[in-house]
Amino acid sequence: MRKIWLMMMLLILIGCEQTQDAAANPQLSVMLDWTPNTNHTGLYVAQEQGYFEAEGLDVEILLPGQTGADQVVASGQADIGIGSQQAVTLARAQDVPIVSVAAIIQHNTSGFAAPVDRSITSPSDFEGKTYGGWGDPIEEAMLDALMMRDQADIDQVEIINIGQADFFTSVERDVDFVWIYYGWTGIEAEVRGVDLDILYLTDYAEELDYYTPVFFANEKLIDEDPEVIEKFVAAVAKGYQDAIQDPDLAASILLDAAPDLDEELVYASQAWLADWYQAEADQWGIQQLEVWQNYANWLDDNGLIEHNPDVSKAFTNQFLPE
């Protein structure tokens, strides 16, 4: 009987310890916006270096599915999502309660890219060409806004949906130009020795220098458990600081997590992005109201949102480390 009693007490103690561990290490799911790449490196560094564990978090990184991270987070199926300021603004305009809690990159590094043999060096050169997009109405608005500055006609552009097709395959076979992010696809072109002409959005409109990507969370989670958001942001901020200070180490950590990635591309992209994560900002992750308002105004002026939302509620800096 004594042995049975001791065994029961041991099981109870183990159960209590596991319960305490579970309480001390809440699970947090983070959904990516794309397959793993150098935009996400700080997340993987924070996981590998134990920064989440030090904050008492058990973080699961989820790959994107058919539904965007904004919808998944809004529905409560994931806790944190990665996406653009654009996605958050569009969501807020439809009263979807997601909030950006940190900017991963301070500036928009995207633009419309084409192989140099297509001779696309200004928006007017889009006329007579084929654009490969992913089916978002905002793409046509972006094209139209840039082309109008050159008195060019978007109706002279053939727009086809190529989804997530590879950029290099697409421009060889189906299209003339695509909207890319220099920090990944532009760097990949350099690695491959492919010469591109890139028309950066920020060269044509200040309003298009928005945050992309960002981390965002559901308003409900922020209200009910702000401490867990604060812990997540503190840990991931350390991860991105490491990526800024030692891009080679950060690249190796990303490659360990996603070994199918091209090694040369990852190291080159990581070295380039090290100067862009924080850029001239006072700290990594910080966001400015002016940036959010300018872009929301641009969307509203171009008829891309149902109403201009209160962008002061679309983002917060409250969880950033002091």
Image (cartoon, helix red, strand yellow):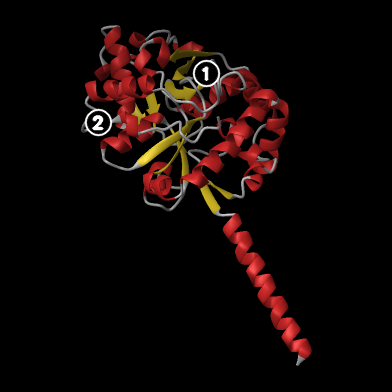
Say if 52 sits above or below 194 in the image. Answer: below
Front position in the image: 133 or 17:
17
Which residue is located at x 49 percent, y 36 percent?
319
Which residue is located at x 56 percent, y 42 percent?
231
Q: What amino acid type is highlighted by mark number 1? A: Ala
Please indicate whether residue 60 sits to the left or right of residue 82 in the image.
right
Say if 62 sits above or below 207 in the image. Answer: below
Which residue is located at x 35 percent, y 30 percent?
160
> Nearer the viewer's eye, disc 2 or disc 1?
1
Q: Where does the image place residue 225, in percent across and percent down from the top left?
A: 46, 49
Please indicate whether residue 130 sits to the left or right of residue 46 in the image.
left
Residue placed farthest to the bottom in the image? 1
C-alpha gap between disc 2 and disc 1 = 29 Å
- Specify the quadrant that holds the C terminus: top right
Neighbours of disc 1 within 10 Å: few (<14), some (14-19), many (20+): few
Neighbours of disc 2 within 10 Å: few (<14), some (14-19), many (20+): many
Find disc 1 in the rendering and name its residue: 281
Front position in the image: 148 or 15:
15
Q: Where does the image place residue 243, in percent across and percent down from the top left?
A: 65, 28
Q: Which mark is residue 305?
A: 2
Q: Where does the image place residue 92, in percent across and percent down from the top left?
A: 30, 37
Under circle 1, the secondary element is: loop
Q: Where does the image place residue 258, in percent across and percent down from the top left?
A: 65, 41
Under circle 2, the secondary element is: loop
Q: Can see residue 158?
A: no
Q: What amino acid type is highlighted by mark number 2? A: Ile
Q: Quadrant of residue 264?
A: top right
